[in-house]
């Protein structure tokens, strides 16, 4: 406790910032800085003990008691090395020791400061309160020849309050730094997760776009190339028309691929490059399919088609495009019906229907991701999409898109 009641505690410990130890049950390794701080505390305790021993030589205390006092002081200085591992135990042990030994006063202050740094205030309050209660008894038992009784008690009260206050300040500062570091780590983790999520969503969007665009073009290439392969004796004008469709489809596929790669390189949004198709482009899509030899009927019952939101129109276009692509692959030669209906404030409905094909259709390779991508598109637009076989054996894709 008693600092040596005759010695004012210096400000050497204000730089105590060693990490909290003993809470986790395992003893951390001391760093070079920890060794410097602990050795400084040990030297400070020894210095105050020597000053207390010098005072004992000039007092009327019996020689045996003086030797016992110094022995307790030496043991207390050695116990300073335990302050990190058992801060509360050392502070409690120093209460009776410092009451009996004047040379252990410096260790009592170091132990109290360490307790204030490493433990919650309730532990500090018990130890500091006990010291304040014992201080008047100590000076009544062993009065200071250089200071009046009241002044000595007040000095100890002030010193104890300053030690506790500074220790709590160091603890608060340390907790603030740990909190800021934790918040910084969490912010970095959240930013990384957001970036990964954004990259994943961008990859999914690009995958959907590549499938919807390239699958349509490459299906045209496959169908007409297959026709040329199986009908080498076709009329010359029909062969020329098929070759023209193949050339045009290949050109469009390359152009779409360049745009997608450009978006990947520049990091632009989906709206980069050429204007994205909207509901108004359905006529061109149907005309392209008719030129490729398909039988397509387009039914549009849309009120004020020019006011359809761009995102809704683009989704409707992709749904019709994928439906035509699937019909061309799995039901060649059938008549496909594309129906679009709706108006402002109502749902925009898109329906692509084809009857069952005649005869056996050779299997066409595919990843099976087109309808999954369309379902995701419709969901992202706030709508829904259903698909499946019709009672007569055909296939139908039905989508509902909100038009606000």
Image (cartoon, rainbow, N blue to C red):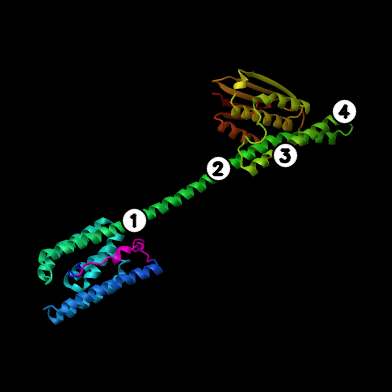
Image coordinates for residue 386, horizontal then vertical, percent:
60, 29
- Classed neighbour count for the residue bearing mark 4: other residues with Cα under 10 Å, few (<14), some (14–19), many (≥20): few
Question: Taking 379 as reference, is 204 above or below it?
Answer: below
x and y percent of residue 1 in the render?
20, 67
Q: CA distance from mark 1 to mark 2?
A: 37 Å
Residue 32, horizontal then vertical, whole percent: 40, 69
Which of marks 2 and 4 precedes in the sequence? 2
Q: Is residue 20 magenta?
A: yes
Q: Residues within 10 Å of mark 3 (few under 14, many from 20)?
A: few
- Local secondary structure at mark 1: helix
Determine whether label 1 and label 3 are within 8 Å by CB: no
Q: Secondary structure under badge 4?
A: helix
Q: Which residue was labeled with disc 4? A: 237
User: Label 2, on which residue?
Assistant: 198
- Kindly identify which residue carries mark 3: 365
Instruction: Give the residue at the far front of this rendering.
Output: 146
Of the pair 365 and 361, the residue shown nearer to us:
365
Res. 109 in view: yes
Q: Say whether residue 364 is visible.
A: no
């Amino acid at each position: 406790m008693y600092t040596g009641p005759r010695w004012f505690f210096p400000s050497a410990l204000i730089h105590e910032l060693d990490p909290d130890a003993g809470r986790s049950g395992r003893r951390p390794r001391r760093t070079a800085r920890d060794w410097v701080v602990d050795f400084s505390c040990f030297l400070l305790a020894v210095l105050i003990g020597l000053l207390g021993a010098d005072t004992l030589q000039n007092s009327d205390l019996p020689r045996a008691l003086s030797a016992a006092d110094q022995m307790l002081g030496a043991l207390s200085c050695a116990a300073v090395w335990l302050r990190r591992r058992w801060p509360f135990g050392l502070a409690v042990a120093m209460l009776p020791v410092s009451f009996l030994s004047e040379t252990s006063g410096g260790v009592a202050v170091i132990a109290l400061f360490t307790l204030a740094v490493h433990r919650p205030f309730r532990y500090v309050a018990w130890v500091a309160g006990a010291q304040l209660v014992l201080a008047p008894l100590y000076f009544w038992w062993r009065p200071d020849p250089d200071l009046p009784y009241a002044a000595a008690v007040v000095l100890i009260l002030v010193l104890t309050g300053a030690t506790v206050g500074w220790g709590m300040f160091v603890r608060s500062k340390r907790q603030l730094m740990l909190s800021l570091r934790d918040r910084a780590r969490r912010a970095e983790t959240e930013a990384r997760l957001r970036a990964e999520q954004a990259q994943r969503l961008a990859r999914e969007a690009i995958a959907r776009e590549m499938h919807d665009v390239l699958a349509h073009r490459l299906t045209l290439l496959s169908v007409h190339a297959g026709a040329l392969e199986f009908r080498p004796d076709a009329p010359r004008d029909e062969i020329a028309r098929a070759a023209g469709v193949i050339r045009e489809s290949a050109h469009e596929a390359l152009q779409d691929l360049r745009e997608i790669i450009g978006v990947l390189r520049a990091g632009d949004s989906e709206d980069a490059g050429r204007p994205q198709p909207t509901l108004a482009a359905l006529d061109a899509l149907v005309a392209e399919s008719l030129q490729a030899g398909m039988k397509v009927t387009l039914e549009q019952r849309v009120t004020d088609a020019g006011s359809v939101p761009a995102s809704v129109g683009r989704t409707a276009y992709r749904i019709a495009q994928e439906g035509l692509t699937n019909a061309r692959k799995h039901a060649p030669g059938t008549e496909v019906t594309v129906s679009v209906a709706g108006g402002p404030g109502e749902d925009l409905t898109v329906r692509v229907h084809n009857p069952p094909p005649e005869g056996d259709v050779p299997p066409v390779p595919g990843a099976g991701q087109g309808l999954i991508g369309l379902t995701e598109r419709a969901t992202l637009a706030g709508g829904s999409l259903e698909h499946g076989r019709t009672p007569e054996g055909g296939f139908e894709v039905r989508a509902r898109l909100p038009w606000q």
